[in-house]
Structures are given as C-alpha cells and as structure tokens.
Image (tube, rainbow, N blue to C red):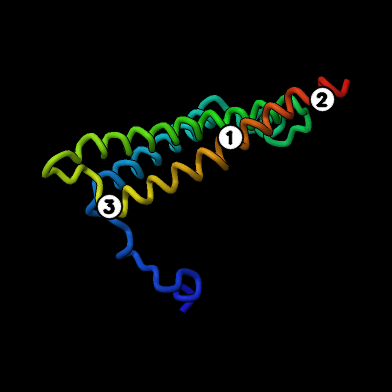
Amino acid sequence: MYQKILFGNLTLAAIPYHNPIIMGAGFFMGLIGAAVIGALLYFNKWKWLWREWITTVDHKKIGVMYIILAIIMLLRGMADAIMMRLQQVLSVGNSMGYLPPEHYDQIFTAHGVIMIFFMAMPFMFGLINLVLPLQIG
C-alpha cells in the first residue's frame, strides 16, 4: 500500500537492467561515490569538511564551492556531448548508432538542463561570490 502511494505505478521492472550503458554508468557512479566516502573516512576529514567548508559563511569559500560544482557539471555535460556526437557519428548508413532513440532524447534534454542550470548558473554565482565583495570593499 505504501509503495503505491510513494512510487505510483513505478515498479522495479522500470529499471533498464538489459541496457549495458545505463548499468555501467550506475556502477561507475556508485564506485566513484564509494571512493570519495572511503577517502573521507580513511583520512578522517569529515569534521574538517563540515566545519571549514559546508557550514562556512566565508564568501570566498562559498564561491569556490560553486565553481567546483560548475566544473563537475561541466565534465558531466561534456560526457553528454561526447555521447551525442558519438551517436551521430555511428548512425551513418544502415547503422542505428549505439543508443536507443529515447535514450538519446533523454541525454539531449539532460545536457541542456545541466549546462544551463547546473554549470552556467553556479559558475556565475561563484564568480559573484568571489568578486562582488571585493568591489564593495
């Protein structure tokens, strides 16, 4: 009952286990996340990260965090662009490329959203946080 309220008609059958691209990306993302958490645990940097960066009110550190997020999203958007170009290169003649049409549409849409909202805007906010207090004095 609660599953129907929470997820609606979405079930585990909606997960595309048969698509190696999506499963490979999910595995790689989990591996990178585990590596970051493992590094934070190994070097015991949780308190430092919380005190010095996440809860800071220093405008320079906030600007740096925005710019780091923009760079990470730039890399993600670049990966989307490479996948779209590779699909266009491989879909010549009788070949259909390596992506299903609905997956290409999702990548195309996600690329635009990521580059505008998660790359350009954080980069501008980061620059504003770094430069504007210096201009004010």
Three-letter amino acid code of the residue under disc 3: Pro
Three-letter amino acid code of the residue under disc 1: Ala
Query: Which sits in the foreground, 25 or 124?
Result: 124
**SS for tag 1?**
helix
Report the quarter where the C terminus lies: top right
In the image, residue 61 lies at what x, y percent?
Answer: 71, 26
| Sequence-earlier tag: 3 or 1 | 3
| Sequence-earlier tag: 2 or 1 | 1
Distance of mark 3 from mark 2, alpha carbons? Answer: 47 Å
In the image, residue 133 lies at what x, y percent?
Answer: 82, 25
| Residue behind mark 2 | 133
Distance of mark 2 from mark 1, alpha carbons? Answer: 20 Å
The image's mark for residue 69 is none
Three-letter amino acid code of the residue under disc 2: Pro
The residue shown at (53%, 28%) is 71
| Disc 3 to disc 2: CB gap under 8 Å | no
In the image, residue 19 lies at what x, y percent?
Answer: 24, 50
| Residue behind mark 1 | 120
User: Label 2: how many residues lie within 10 Å, few (<14), some (14-19) or many (20+)?
Assistant: few
The residue shown at (75%, 23%) is 131
The residue shown at (46%, 79%) is 1
| Residue behind mark 3 | 101
Query: Which sits in the foreground, 83 or 7?
Result: 83
| Disc 2 to disc 1: CB gap under 8 Å | no
